[in-house]
Amino acid sequence: MHLVRYQLPGQRPRAGVRTDDTVAPVQGFAGIAELLRLTVEELREAVGKTGDEVRVQDVRLLPPLDGYGEVWCAGVTYERSRGARMEESTEQSVYDRVYSAPRPELFPKSPAWRLVTDGEPIGIRDDSGHDVPEPELAVVANSRGQIVGYTICNDLSSRSIEGENPLYIPQAKVFAGGCALATGIRPVWEVADPKALTIDLAIRRDGADVFTGTTSTGSLVRELQDLVDVLFAPNEFPHGVILATGTGIVPELDFALRAGDEVEIAISEIGTLTNTVAVGREPFAFLATESLEETR
């Protein structure tokens, strides 16, 4: 089972429960934002009350976050990430220190309206030249700071911009098409051990694999609830928040994404996320247009 946002032709988006090839609306709740104001127990009860099913092929699946929801990211939480950041950076020591520091690296990535999802394009900056995907397990927290589910995040990053100066991290991380989420949220009660999941990344170019990688969330140096607690300590998230927990798969320095590359991320028990790379702002103008029209 996955919690989803979906849209029937001519109707407004709504929250639903996806089971295999069907989706059913959650009765009494218009969107994900309302569901993320519930406790875990209340959410479990709410998603058990659904309306008439429709076929997945007849709806448009949207990113599973709405309202004032936000996506944040944690950085340098895997040993591989620490090594890659040190290799690319002119200021190597900051990454070595933050890996083991009591305070994790956390940064805002995207508001709900700017997200893309499975089957939509992902972006790289046209002034970067060296961009990579970052496949990450993302925890979904309610407004109370409780973890209520998990999804997949592709936290795209410009290695050249961040490597030039760590103070450029916001520019290296926040850009059009730079954050993709899988369409579904797997409820917390259906995942026995989130620190025992396999993450696979495949990048295809002209139909052939040009990079593949695998890691496990067991290599994550931080505890998931600890990351959420640090995020909530100074902040309120009235419509919930999704926190991507860092990547353990980073291509070598001689690899960079190109326009047209297909990026597929799979996390065991959670799902898959597949997108094709586009360059610059223009391919993502639809996000602002749909947001202003309140259809997304």
Image (spheres, rainbow, N blue to C red):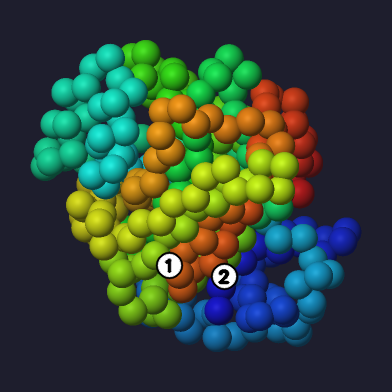
x 77%, y 60%: residue: 60
Between 4 and 171, the residue placed more toward the observer is 171
Residue 182 at what x, y percent from top left? 57, 57
Q: Can residue 148 be seen?
A: no
For label 1, the crowd category at 10 Å Cα-Cα, with few meaning under 14, some 14 to 19 and many 20 or more, is many
Q: Secondary structure at mark 2?
A: strand
x 58%, y 33%: residue: 257
Q: Secondary structure at mark 1?
A: strand
* Picture quadrant of residue 26: bottom right
Residue with the mark numbered 1 = 149
Between 143 and 6, the residue placed more toward the observer is 6
Q: Is residue 193 left or right of residue 133?
A: left
Q: Can residue 200 be seen?
A: yes
Q: Residue flagged by tag 2: what amino acid is it?
A: Leu
Residue 238 at what x, y percent from top left? 43, 52
Between 230 and 164, the residue placed more toward the observer is 164
Number of labelled discs? 2
x 83%, y 61%: residue: 11
- Using the numbered discs, state the Cα–Cα distance from disc 2 to disc 1 in whole angstroms: 9 Å
Q: Is residue 291 above or below residue 279?
A: below
Mark carried by residue 3: 2
Residue 212 at what x, y percent from top left? 49, 50
